[in-house]
Structures are given as C-alpha cells and as structure tokens.
Amino acid sequence: MKKEAFNKTFIGFTLISMSGLFGACGNETEVVEKKPNVLILFSDQHRKDVMGFEGHPDVITPHLDKFAEESVVFDRAYCSVGICAPSRSSMMSGIYPRTLGLLSNSERTTVMKEVVSLASVFKQNNYNTFAFGKRHTYNAIDEGWDEHRSHLCSETPGNSYTEWVEKNGYGAEFAMDWAAEFGRGSNCSSWADSVLPIADLGTRISSLPEDMTMEAFTAKLTIEMIREQAESDDPFFCWATFYRPHQPYTPLRKYMDMYDVSEWGDGRINGSSISKPASFYEPKENLPPMMQSIREGENKVWNVDKAFADEQIWRDHIGAYYALVTEMDHLIGEIIQALDEAGIAEETIVIYVSDHGDFVGNHGMVEKTAAGQNVYEDILNVPLIIRYPGNKQNGKRNAELVSLVDIFPTLVDLIGLEMPELKYPLQGLSISKSLTEGEPLNREYVVSESWSQATVITRDHKLGIMIDPTDYARRFDFRDFGDQFFVGKDDPLEIHNQIENPSYSDDIENLREMYSRFKSEVPDIGKQEVILNF
C-alpha cells in the first residue's frame, strides 16, 4: 500500500486503494480504512518550562521547539501524581491512582490486575504494539505488547539495556553512571553488588559513547521499528520512553559543554552563564517537612547542604539536567526525522509527554521529593504536545485544564478505537474536541494525589491538602505542617502560602469542596486495599 495514497486533506486517516478484488463486472473498488499510527515519546522527570519554546533562558531544545510549532501545546497539563509508576500507570490505564491503589512506586493491588491497558486496546484493534525503554508499570497495566525492551532488567530479563550495554563492552562506564545515585551498578549487571562512589546531587559526567546511553537505546529501537513498520498494512502503537532527565544526572561531555556552569549569569539569551533558579533561596521553613530535611542535608545521596556551601555543585547539577534534556531533544529529532524518511509522518499521531517534573534548583531542591510533597508546579505541570496530522489547531497553545489520565480516552475517541467491556470505566476526559476544534472543556479543576498530599488545581488557585497516612514516611507529621494555598497569577513561584489569609477563605473552602466531590466520584477501591495491608 503506497503511503502517498494517504489523504492529507482531511482528518480521518482513510486510505482508499484499488485492491484488485473485483466483482463479476470487474469495476468494484474496495475501501480500506487504515487507522493512524500512534507514537508516544515519553520522558521521565522533565519539567515543563525547561524547553526553549517555553522561553527558558538557558536550555537548548531545537527539535522540541520545532515540534511544538507543528502541534498543539497544552499549557495546563498535570500528572495525576508526581511519582513515576503511579503517574505512568494512570496514563496507561485511564484510571486514577486512588482507584488503582497505586500512589507510590511499590504497591500492587487486585485492581491493577483487573484493568485494561491502553496497549491491550490498541492490540485488540489490530495494531502492532511496541514499548522501548523503562515502563515502570505492572500487572494488567503492562499487558498488550507485541515487543518490549526496557532499560530495567526486571521488565525485560535477559534483553534489557543494562545487559545490552554490558555485552557491548561498556558495563563499567554505565555502572559508574548508575552509582552516582545508587552507589552500585544496576541490577543484573556485573557491578550490581559492587560498592561504587555516589556523587553529590547525583551528578557526574558519563564516559559512555554517544550511541550507548539509555536515551540512545530507546531512539535506536524506535527508529528501527519505524523503518520496519513503514511497510506494514497494519498501524502501530509505540510507547518510546526515555529514562532522562531523571536522576542519576550523568550527561555526556558533548552536551554538558553546551552550558557554561562556571558562574551564575542572566541566561543564555544574553550569552552568559546559566541562570540561578528563581526560588533558589526560598526559606526552608516555607517547605513541607521532608523537603526541609533534605535542605538540611539529611539525605546523603543528595547532600544539598554541601551544595549550598559550594554552589558550583549546584551549577554542575543544573547544567547536567539541561544537558540530559538536550541529548533527549537531539534523539527526538532523529526519531521524527525517521518518520519523515519512512514517508509515514502524515499518518502518525505523535505525542510528547512526561510523567512528572523536577525542581532543578527551584525551592532550593533537587529531583522531586515524591514521598514528601505533591503540590508544586515544578513537579505537577508536565509537557503535553500533540501533533495530529491535518489538525487546524496545530501551532496553537491550549490553556484547558488537562490530566494525564485523559490521554487514554482521548486516543480512543480520536481514532475511534473499539473498546472491550471494562470492569472499571475510564475515569479521564476525552480532550479530542479541544485538540481538534479548540472546544472548551469547561473543567473546573483537576486533582493530583499522592499518599502525602492531595492537590486541587483550578485556573487561578491551588490547594495542597496534607495527608498523614498510617505508616508512610512516619518520621514526618505532614498534617502538623498544614495545608498550602497558592494564587497563581500573583505568585507563580509558589513561595507565598496564603492558607491563613482570610481574603481567600471562600476560595479555599471552594477547593476543599472540589476535593470532596472528587473523592465521591472517584472510588478509592485500591487505596483502601493498600491501606489495609500497609
């Protein structure tokens, strides 16, 4: 089937071909409908504003900048929880974490065994399904793949990145990268039980060749798949996941050298050193308890107190984060180019999204402090960019409130996928009309919820409700700290907690009512199960 036959004028992805299967009169035409390919380019811990087109003064992302110009950019997209596994699982199941019972990385519940995964739905609709890179999903949420290869040994034993890089002779180099956070090599590597040096703020320069990084592994497999699937009569669904810019922060020297970290400056737009984070010196008393403890240096992986005593450590760390984003951007450019070269760009929906963000020095913090907070924009507001061929909205920015749990029902609606019978109905909202027609969603609020903090987000306000679960992070009494209320337009850095300001008492009460409504509408079946076995 010639790819040139694809109708580029109308959204609908209908291919019409002369099949050669003629009736008695020899003049019948078969109409063959081929649904679009779907490629989700997925990063781990990429803060939304750390991209060039977002006006960031330092970071270099030419390929994402160009991709955004060709797509719809959702400015108010939020993860359902600022932690890897539950955020990914929510997106791939269309079910909120409280129903799954998965609000940190470790839980397993019966609900997780009974949902239907997005990959399974694509598979049942005659798609070829692929996942390359870390998935961090479990049970039925991780079903439906024709082919998958992970960065993690546990997800593809014997065929993971860890084993691949070691077989190629670079196991020692990768072990040093991994040890920057963990103090040892990755599981299933020869260095798994070795004691190796941790790095301050989990940051050091990698010695790996450019084609041997975790990001290169994802890109290599994705590009090979694109070239193979370009000749297939069946569409594909691919979840291509990058491990970065998640810690350990170990960029290649090539990308690190793009950033001047010798001193604080006013940003690359002025040709100077990297900018100091805007809320870098926020008083630690403003912060939730676990964040305060990290600022005081209790976490000896990060050594934040040491970094404040020698801010070169901070500059190296922030530059390393930007360098990892730039490497990922380069490889995203290669993947998009592969679609063009294969002649299937116009029949492929491409989504760029991340599971959550990273502080990158804001609030004087490193990584995400997942167990101790779930409120800040740095963590909850994620990039969501969707390129839908033929869409008249491409090139526009969308300010509607969106959640990652919406991606599943949106793709079902957008493509017209047939759905199996579900024990747990999809809980997200289809945003297809907003994507293709700019139609308002009229959504009052979205909720992001972890074990420690549930946050209600509206257009103008944000309420973080502290929760003190039975046994979780028991060193910190979250409720004693109190709740947090931020006014976005007046306090974009979220450093002025207005929870005690009587001027906002009605607004605060309104958001509390929204959370009560959310809890009544979204059952906590799995959450209750986990608490009983905590």
Image (cartoon, rainbow, N blue to C red):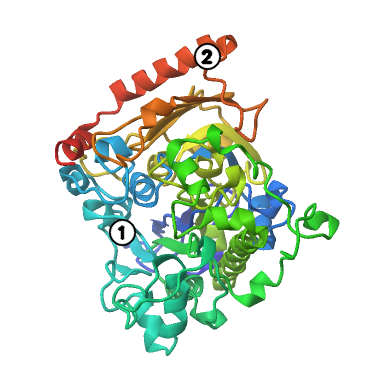
Where residue 526 sits, quadrant-wise, is top left
For marks 2 and 1, the one nearer the N-term is: 1
Classify 10 Å Cα crowding around label 1: few (below 14), some (14-19), many (20 and above). Answer: some
Q: What mark, if any, has residue 507 been given in the picture? A: 2
Q: Residue furthest bottom?
A: 169
Q: Where is residue 129 in the image (x, y as percent from the top left)?
A: 34, 63
Residue at the extreme right of the image, as rendered: 270
Residue type pointed to by label 1: Asn
- Residue 436 percent location from the top left of the image: 55, 39
Q: Using residue 157 as the reference point, say whether residue 416 is left or right of it.
A: right
Relative image position of residue 23 (x, y in whole percent): 33, 62
Q: Residue at x 35, y 60 (%)?
A: 135
Which amino acid, mark 2? Asp
Seen at 53% across and 41% down, the residue is: 381
- As displayed, is residue 448 above or below residue 203? above
Vertical relation: 301 (above or below) 20: above
State whether residue 78 appears in this view.
Answer: yes
State the residue position of label 1.
Answer: 126
Tag 2 secondary structure: helix
